[in-house]
Image (cartoon, grey):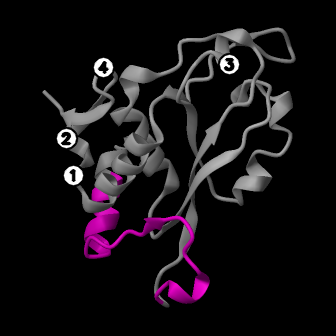
Amino acid sequence: MYKQSLMARMYEQQGQILARTGVEVNEVPDGDVESGHIYVLQSLSTDPQVAALEDLHKISFSTTSVEQRIKNAELSPTYLKAPVPVVADYRLYNVRPSAIEYLLHRIFATVRLGLTQVDRKRQDFDPSEGLIVTRDAINQAVAMIVSGESVEYVYDSTSQQLIPRK
């Protein structure tokens, strides 16, 4: 469903979907409308299960500012109840942020964090947006989504590379 939606938006925009960080407002063509952000966070959790994980990142989306979205992260199991510095913020134009997030999570499905946390109501919570993946691979996946080739790739945790889907 998300793939079809992304493909439809790309067709409508003649394949032009901008997903870059650091874009100034005056660099965006007049017809483009900012639709949200894909952001990448790194956990500063002191929980030994989390702190020992190298390259643990959370990839998610927001239609508001990332700073607003992660406010009070240290209280939320979604953010592993810890502060979370932003390591990447891709501003999106003319596309549903949830569609891009879906594609990224599909690419990195094999490296989801397998950890259960307990929320404020003492219920188990699985932070499924936690991924053990390098920033280089995340940047490459975003670039591939923009170019339209990402749907045929998955992340191989052994080589830490994006490889063609079998």
The C terminus: image quadrant: top left
Quadrant position of the N terminus in the picture = top left
| Circle 3/circle 2 CB separation < 8 Å | no
Question: x, y (%) of residue 21?
Answer: 54, 65
Hey, what amino acid is under mark 2? Glu
* Region in magenta: 5-29
Mark 3–mark 4 CB contact (< 8 Å)? no
Residue to which mark 4 is pinned: 158
> Where does label 3 land, which residue?
51
Under mark 1, the amino acid is Glu
Asked whether 122 or 81 is in front, the reply is 81
Q: Earlier in the sequence, mark 2 or mark 4?
A: 2
Looking at the image, residue 28 lies above or below residue 162 = below
Q: Dividing the picture into quarters, in which one does residue 129 lie?
A: top right
Residue at 20%, 34% (x, y): give it: 163
Residue 44 appears at what percent x and percent y? Answer: 74, 30
Measured Cα–Cα span from mark 2 to mark 4: 18 Å
Residue type, mark 4 in image: Thr
Image marks 1 and 2: residues in contact by CB distance under 8 Å: yes
Alpha carbon separation for disc pair 3 and 4: 21 Å
Give the mark nearest the N terminus, 3 or 1: 3
Q: Choose mark 2 or mark 4, whichever is in front.
A: 4
Q: Which mark is residue 149?
A: 1
In this rendering, the answer to whether 76 lies above or below 137 is above
Is residue 22 covered in magenta?
Answer: yes
**Element class at badge 2:** helix
Residue 123 badge: none
Identify the residue under disc 2: 152
Q: CA distance from mark 1 to mark 2?
A: 6 Å
Up the image or down, 133 lies above or below 104; here it is above
User: In the displayed structure, does residue 94 sit left or right of residue 51?
Assistant: left
